[in-house]
Amino acid sequence: MGVVPIHKKMDDGGHIGTEGDRDRMRMTRSRPLPGHFMDIAMEEARAAARRGEVPVGAALSGPDGLLLARAGNRVEEWGDPSAHAEMQVMRTASVQRGGLRLADCTMYVTLEPCPMCAAAATHFRVGRIVFGAYDPKGGGVEHGPRLFAQPRCLHRPEIVGGVREREAGRLLREFFQRLRA
């Protein structure tokens, strides 16, 4: 039996722990801390919405805690169904680092990765995925094929879901409500 991915559900504040932990999640002078990367992903999602894209954003941090890549969906703009935010940050980071493996990196994304992005994360060997809103219809991590739970999955990142879930979900709902109006 293989390793089972670690799944954690964070409260809507986007953190686990005490008030003191919340303070440590803010950006410091030396380098940004984890909460900052979800802020970046949310900024990218809002920018995607302004471009008429489904509002999903991603950020990828390296082992030193510094930002390697950030992106928002560009599927419509580029006419490329694989131009999801997650795909872009994994590609960019691997090129920057000169290698395919991202095992010591964390990817932050505003929506549960779809099956395509989850499969790509296994090939890039992303070490940890932190996501906001759950996606019962199109997700591939906690929903749909639940890729990382499959016995033959070649890599299982640590998964943290529900980080700023309400905020990320609200952005998506508002985007689709405007489309239908």
Image (cartoon, rainbow, N blue to C red):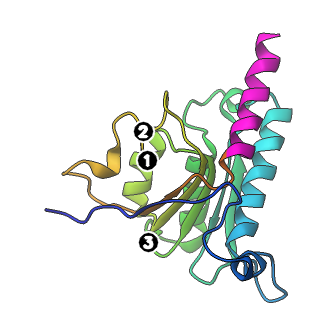
Give the farthest residue toward the top.
Answer: 181
Left or right: residue 59 compared with residue 103:
right
Question: Is residue 127 rendered to the left or right of residue 1?
Answer: right
Q: CA distance from mark 2 to mark 3?
A: 19 Å
Image vertical order of residue 115 relative to residue 94, above or below: above
Q: CA distance from mark 1 to mark 3?
A: 14 Å
Query: What residue is shown with label 2?
Result: 115
Residue 103 is labelled as: 3
Determine contact: label 2, label 1, CB under 8 Å.
Answer: yes
Q: Is residue 154 left or right of residue 61?
A: left
Residue 168, percent across and down? 71, 43
Instruction: Specify the amino acid type for callout 3.
Output: Ala
In the foreground, 136 or 64 = 136
Residue 62 image position (x, y, % from top left): 59, 75
Residue labelled with disc 1: 118
Residue type at the position of mark 2: Pro
Amino acid carrying mark 1 in the image? Ala
| Residue farthest bottom in this picture | 30
Q: Which residues are magenta?
A: 166-181
Residue 20: x, y in percent? 73, 82
**Mark before the other along the chain sequence, 2 or 3:** 3
**Residue at 45% over, 68% down:** 127
Name the residue at 79% across, 89% down.
Answer: 30
Q: Residues within 10 Å of mark 3 (few under 14, many from 20)?
A: some
- Kindly state the secondary structure of the residue where label 3 is placed: loop
Residue 67 placement (x, y as % from top left): 70, 71
